[in-house]
């Protein structure tokens, strides 16, 4: 046996096969990398990269056979002779093994490709009239030209969305798919669309070069592509030509009229692209960068001056002003937009946002319902209407969120809204299915936060803590994770850990019932945040707990309560403040006024027969104020079937429950939530170990559950 091996390796050295294999591998790797780069940059079909890999795999045994059989010498290429009969046997056996191994490798790869294509086709149902416009790449040397590339793709997407015969993937999902690095096939599958529009833009001097192509999302093949070289003032014409070409290929037998762009004025278009780029930066941060937003407002104003008859320029100006908090200033542009184009869904959405912010909740609902009627595929309108219905305790919330997710399947805000609705209404199976669906989305700290919030509502605070630690580990510099962790630890009664995470947290101190400290901190915080309703409701409840009833009323009356809610509630914080006002009036002996407010609330809200403490404990409190003690006890008993943890300052310190302190049913409810907290504290270490996370560490990379 040793002698045979010696013959084999002697042949290897003689024929330079090892050197040939090393050179072949290096060349194959380099060429494959180049091909992948070219495919991405030139928007070629993904199968081109796959074909290159298969070519090199299949070519390997051929190259090795040639290296074994021939040698390159100074006298040219000559055939190599076998040194011995044992060498011949070794060669034959080696060739058989080489071919068999390469064939095996090929068949190992092929099924995975087939499964990928097959499972993709089976899992995704494509509507033939569906399109996703991906963010165009900025190919300019100057990064400040990014607004041109992103602006063109945004305007194209919005233009398509105004056409009833097209189903368009929303901006947030298209951007998310791009940020995740998905190719055209993967993006089409993730977004559920049959067509992908990709492109790039380059500015050189006064020449804009726009490269664009329409890709079939089912096979990755380009259906149409074009390159435009125009001046900046001709960008609108390019947009219209692209829109016409896409419609011609996506709806070949349709005579549908192509929607007008937001403006026909090139100057107004330039201002709108710049303004929108800035505004989206602010909104994506979820933090009002006032200077940036003011600049966006200034540019929108310039756009309306250049084209006063652009309804969308007027509407977007109003929207930016609403986000800035300048509600009075938003009135004129939204009214102008309505006078120009009353039947644009986007305009009605902005009107709804303004009326809601102004407290005209009924009118807000009318505007949002009209926005959905005008464009049933507008995910923003669907989600805002769902949110409006949620606060008015009306039905249809989950259905609207699901419809919004059909058009914007990567929008985490919509997942959060749907999760909140399902958990609050005890649709636990659907809520857990939604959590599983969210786990399949691409990793991000924002995703982990939404999963944590949903699990918290379901009472799984230990898992909410684990997911929030994962979010913190992905974003260690984001303070949001620290204070969320502090609140979760306070929820389960681990106050020592909660304070170590956030020593001056008003929320933690409130849940600890350290009310004087809360009052001191909250009154100071109100100097900077006088409009924060959650802060005022917390401050008012703290005053109630220590008997400062007049102070509680004063804090709440500055918010416009109770009158601001007579047309409907806008937020949970507003409802909490309203109930705190009821309790303050009740504690001061203003019984009839408190009962009138309670009757209005019970009639308006209705209180569905669910187990969420927000519903059961609030209802029990209002029943107690009305003297309906038996109904109050029934509501408290129902609370014991829920899992979301009640806030102790509400259950233990609101005046409405004062006479129930020795009531067996009330005490059972208090005991039930105390025992759940103890159970969660006990379960937490095992949960963190299962997730592979720890509170005191923040590794750079975090494994997903089940990895």
Image (cartoon, rainbow, N blue to C red):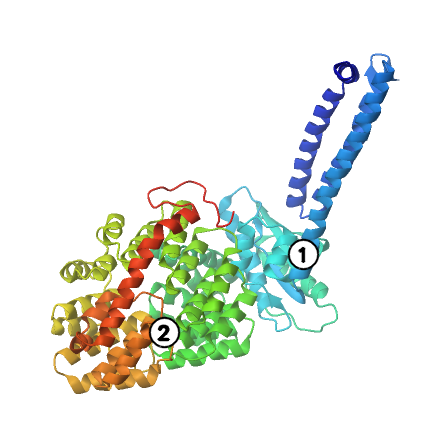
**Residue 380 versus residue 487 in the image, above or below:** below
Q: Residues within 10 Å of mark 1 (few under 14, many from 20)?
A: few
Camera sees residue 498: yes
Q: On the image, numbered disc 2 is attached to which residue? A: 611
Contact flag, marks 1 and 2 (Cβ < 8 Å): no
**Residue 343 versus residue 141 in the image, above or below:** below
User: Which residue is drawn at the image coordinates 56% and 54% (left, top)?
Assistant: 177
User: Which residue is drawn at the image coordinates 60% and 50% (left, top)?
Assistant: 200
What kind of element bears circle 1? helix
Which of the 4 quarters of the picture holds residue 665? bottom left
What whole-number distance in Å separates the C-alpha atoms at marks 1 and 2? 40 Å
Residue 253 spot, x, y in % from top left? 75, 71
Q: Nearer the viewer, residue 320 or 425?
A: 425
Indicate which disc residue 119 carries.
1
Camera sees residue 80: no
**Residue 534 versus residue 147 in the image, above or below:** below
Which of the 4 quarters of the picture holds residue 605? bottom left
Residue 389 spot, x, y in % from top left? 42, 77
Q: Quadrant of the N terminus?
A: top right
Compared across the picture, whether 320 is left or right of 207 comes to left
């Amino acid at each position: 046996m040793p002698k045979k091996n010696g013959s084999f390796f002697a042949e290897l050295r003689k024929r330079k096969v090892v050197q040939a294999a090393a050179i072949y591998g290096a060349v194959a790797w380099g060429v494959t990398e180049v091909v992948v780069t070219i495919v991405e940059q030139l928007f070629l079909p993904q199968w081109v990269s796959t074909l290159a890999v298969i070519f090199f795999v299949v070519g390997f045994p051929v190259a090795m056979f040639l290296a074994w059989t021939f040698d390159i010498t100074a006298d040219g290429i000559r055939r190599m002779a076998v040194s011995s009969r044992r060498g011949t046997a070794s060669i034959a056996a080696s060739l058989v093994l080489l071919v068999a191994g390469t064939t095996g490798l090929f068949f190992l790869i092929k099924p995975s490709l087939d499964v990928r294509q097959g499972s993709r086709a089976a899992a995704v149902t494509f509507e033939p009239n569906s399109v996703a416009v991906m963010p165009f790449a900025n190919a300019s040397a100057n990064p400040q030209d990014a607004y041109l590339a992103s602006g063109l793709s945004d305007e194209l997407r919005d233009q398509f969305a105004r056409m009833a015969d097209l189903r368009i993937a929303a901006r947030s999902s298209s951007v998310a798919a791009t940020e995740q690095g998905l190719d055209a096939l993967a993006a089409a599958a993730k977004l559920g669309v049959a067509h992908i529009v990709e492109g790039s833009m380059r500015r050189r001097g006064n020449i804009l070069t726009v490269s664009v192509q329409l890709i079939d999302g089912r096979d990755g093949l380009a259906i149409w592509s074009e390159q435009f070289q125009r001046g900046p003032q001709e960008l609108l014409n390019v947009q219209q030509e692209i829109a016409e070409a896409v419609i011609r290929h996506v709806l070949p037998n349709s005579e549908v009229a192509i929607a007008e762009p937001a403006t026909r004025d090139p100057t107004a278009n330039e201002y709108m692209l710049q303004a929108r780029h800035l505004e989206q930066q602010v909104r994506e941060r979820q933090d009002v960068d006032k200077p940036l937003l003011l600049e966006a407002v200034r540019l929108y104003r310039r756009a309306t001056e250049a084209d006063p008859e652009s309804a969308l320029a007027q509407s977007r100006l109003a929207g930016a002003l609403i986000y800035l908090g300048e509600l009075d200033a938003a009135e004129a542009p939204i009214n102008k937009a309505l006078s120009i184009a009353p039947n644009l869904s986007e305009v009605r959405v902005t009107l709804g946002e303004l009326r809601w912010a102004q407290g005209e909740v009924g009118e807000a609902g009318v505007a949002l319902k009209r926005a959905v009627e005008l464009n049933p595929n507008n995910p923003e309108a669907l989600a805002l209407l769902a949110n409006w219905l949620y606060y008015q305790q009306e039905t249809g919330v989950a259905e609207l969120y699901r419809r919004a997710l059909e058009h914007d399947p990567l929008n985490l805000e919509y997942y959060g809204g749907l999760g909140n609705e399902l958990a609050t209404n005890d649709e636990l199976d659907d809520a857990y299915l939604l959590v599983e669906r969210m786990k399949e989305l691409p990793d991000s700290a924002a995703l982990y936060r939404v999963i944590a919030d949903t699990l918290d509502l379901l009472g799984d605070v230990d898992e909410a803590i684990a997911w929030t630690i994962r979010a913190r580990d992905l974003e260690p510099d984001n303070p949001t994770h620290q204070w969320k962790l502090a609140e979760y630890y306070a929820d389960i009664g681990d106050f020592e850990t909660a304070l170590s995470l956030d020593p001056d947290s008003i929320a933690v101190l409130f849940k600890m019932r350290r009310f004087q400290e809360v009052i001191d901190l909250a009154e100071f915080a109100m100097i900077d945040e006088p409009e924060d309703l959650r802060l005022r409701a917390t401050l008012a409840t703290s005053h109630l707990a220590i008997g400062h009833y007049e102070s509680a009323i004063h804090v709440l009356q500055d918010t416009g309560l109770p009158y601001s809610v007579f047309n409907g509630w806008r937020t949970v914080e507003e409802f909490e403040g309203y109930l705190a006002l009821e309790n303050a009036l009740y504690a001061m002996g203003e019984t009839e006024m408190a009962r009138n407010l309670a009757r209005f609330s019970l009639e308006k809200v209705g209180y569905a027969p669910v187990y969420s403490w927000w519903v059961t404990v609030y209802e029990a409190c209002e029943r107690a104020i009305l003297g309906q003690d038996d109904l109050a006890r029934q509501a408290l008993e129902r609370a014991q079937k829920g899992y979301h943890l009640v806030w102790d300052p509400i259950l233990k310190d609101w005046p409405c429950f004062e006479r129930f302190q020795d009531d067996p049913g009330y005490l059972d409810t208090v005991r039930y939530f105390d025992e759940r907290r103890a159970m969660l504290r006990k379960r937490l270490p095992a949960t963190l170990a299962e997730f592979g996370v720890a509170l005191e560490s923040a590794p750079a990379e975090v494994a997903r559950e089940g990895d």
